[in-house]
Amino acid sequence: MFRGRYEHTIDAKGRLSVPSRIRETLNERYDSRLVVTTYDNCLIAYPFPEWQKLEEKVAALPEFQKDTKAFLRFFYSSATDCSIDKLGRILIPQTLRDYAKLENDVILVGAFRHIEIWSKPLWEKAEQASQDDIVNTLERLGL
């Protein structure tokens, strides 16, 4: 599973170096294929087998229901295969970089079964905003 926070930079061509710890987890449990999509002001990178599990769940949803259609349009329309190259990088398409405002400083966040890719300024805002929510959630869950 993925955990930890890593600071990296994305180059002008959209190449992002995947931290060695994340690559190790991918090699041990999955392969070098990632599916990257948009969500909540960041990008989410799923190892391909985890993406397939998500697709199985989505296949069971009522396809013509309004909220399902909205989900499919937003989440799936931006999904892109991004394999890790020989140098340990992924190429993030411009449309995804624009959505997540990835310009230079990037934060990669291990989030259990997937990896979140944030612009550093948006991550800092989200982290600050969620501090109270985290405490409340932990209390509610009895942790």
Image (spheres, rainbow, N blue to C red):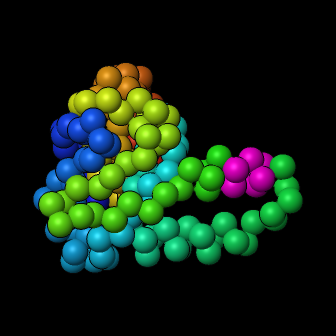
Residue 49 in view here: yes
In the image, is residue 41 above or below residue 76?
Answer: above
Q: Residue at x 44, y 63 (%)?
A: 81
Task: Count the labels in the image.
Answer: 0
Q: Quadrant of residue 65?
A: bottom right
Q: What quarter of the picture does the N terminus occupy?
A: bottom left
Residue 46 in view here: no
In the image, is residue 83 above or below residue 71?
Answer: below
In the image: residue 98, left or right of residue 119: right
- Residue located farthest toward the front when viewing the structure as drawn: 13
Where does residue 97 sit, x and y in percent of width and height? 42, 38
Where does residue 17 sit, x and y in percent of width and height? 20, 50
Q: Residue at x 51, y 45 (%)?
A: 38
Q: Residue at x 24, y 64 (%)?
A: 85
As rendered, which of 125 and 85 lies closer to the eye?
Answer: 85
Where does residue 129 sit, x and y in percent of width and height? 41, 23
Range of the magenta residues?
Answer: 67-73
Where does residue 68 sit, x and y in percent of width and height? 76, 55
In the image: residue 64, left or right of residue 73: right
As rendered, which of 42 and 97 lies closer to the eye?
Answer: 97
Q: Main secondary structure of the magenta part?
A: helix
Q: Residue at x 70, y 72 (%)?
A: 59
